[in-house]
Image: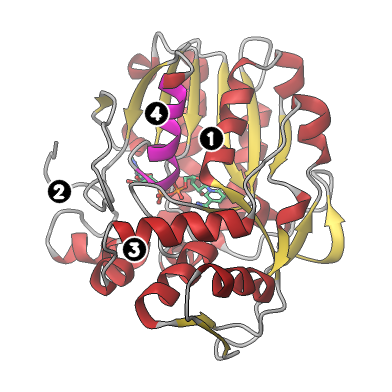
Amino acid sequence: MRVLVTGHQGYLGTVMVPMLIAEGHDVVGLDNGYFADCILGPAPVDPPKVETDLRDVTAAQLAGFDAVIHLAALSNDPLGSLAPEITYDINHFASVRLARAAKDAGVSRFLYASTCSVYGSAGEDLVTEDAPLRPLTPYAESKVRVEDDAAAIADSGFAPVFLRNATAFGFSPRLRADIVLNNLVGHAVLTGDVRVLSDGTPWRPLVHAQDIARAFITCLTAPTEAIYCTAYNVGTETNNLTVADIAQSVVEAVPDSTLLITGESGPDPRSYRVDFSRARAGLGYEATWSIPDGARELYAAYTSYGLTSDAFFQRFTRLPQLEKLQAAGEIDQSMRRVSARA
Ligand SMILES: NC(=O)c1ccc[n+]([C@@H]2O[C@H](COP(=O)([O-])OP(=O)(O)OC[C@H]3O[C@@H](n4cnc5c(N)ncnc54)[C@H](O)[C@@H]3O)[C@@H](O)[C@H]2O)c1
């Protein structure tokens, strides 16, 4: 299939693109390149790209694609809360605009990267896709709105599917340090401390970046009736863990590290345990990576590629990297590129 991947130069996109190509798909990217140079280890080989900000994409640019995989977003809660209007502009309005342009161009599938954080605070019970959505942040709210608005334009020629990914972990050449397992392992490697800022009790479902990529690849070729306007939680019940449990796996993976649960950030209302049975039944899909394996993978990558504190806390953390691009005049206050870049 000919597939457009938005956000292909981000953390997940950089893992997904080579897996799509290995499956025989013809891939084109679309990305502002905010993190294009934030690389750990050998540089990835990027596919050709459509040169546009997501907010300006036209139907003509989408002609000839069979599917759009939509990953591009301001991708976390702190970012969304600092600049909520830009988060809604990119994550909601531009995403719906993209979906409409795709439909107008005759693209038949729209695979959307949603998130389990749409469930917000859900207590101890496992939440299915039919659970009430209680987004707690502009980031999560924007994901709910796109699901609703893309479903509203679905028809026999345009099938959207909503992949509600658990929090990702695992190595990507374009690393993210601001997601929980990647962060804890990095801290432990750089300082010797596995430092948990909450009280460790919130539940977090986790899923490896490669497992997320496999879920999208599965949805590309699944029968239309299996995906049409359907939300799928992406992950596995085995990886529904408390932050304290996740931290314990890190202590076991990083030699001579020590667990510190400081509680300094106060209570974290985002807590949910997720049911993944719909994807098993509907797609035959199951995530396979465990947290201990992910912690060991990250430890090996960080130590063999020489992770530094500067890279970890700046380049691989979304907010300071965007602030750096703004300070350097490479992007403006609305996060638009000021000048064309390769
Ligand atoms: N990583 C996770 O834990 C996780 C979990 C659930 C859902 N998701 C979703 O998956 C998607 C990808 O996540 P990620 O971790 O790879 O994020 P990321 O921040 O690494 O990548 C996002 C990419 O989108 C691009 N982008 C942002 N705004 C753009 C614009 N206006 N025009 C063009 N490109 C733009 C950025 O340059 C970046 O490369 C996001 O939609 C995110 O919300 C991620």
Amino acid type indicated by mark 2: Val
Q: Quadrant of residue 313?
A: bottom left
Q: Amino acid at mark 3?
A: Thr
Q: Residue 304, relative to residue 101: is it above or below?
A: below
First in sequence, mark 4 or 3: give its number.
4
By secondary structure, the bulk of the magenta-drawn segment is best described as: helix
From the viewer's side, name the closer residue of 181 and 127. Answer: 181
The number of discs equals: 4
Q: Amino acid at mark 4?
A: Pro
Instruction: Return the x and y of residue 53 as percentages of the image width and height.
Output: 29, 37
Which of pointers 1 and 3 lies earlier in the amino acid sequence?
1
Residue position for label 4: 18
Label 1 close to label 3 by CB (< 8 Å): no
Calculate the distance from the C-alpha at mark 4 to the C-alpha at mark 2: 29 Å
At mark 3, the secondary structure is helix
Report the span colored magenta. Answer: 10-21
Of 224 and 193, nearer the camera is 193
Marks 1 and 4 sit apart, C-alpha to C-alpha, by 10 Å
Read off the residue under disc 2. 338
Are the residues at dot 4 and dot 3 in contact (C-beta closer than 8 Å)? no
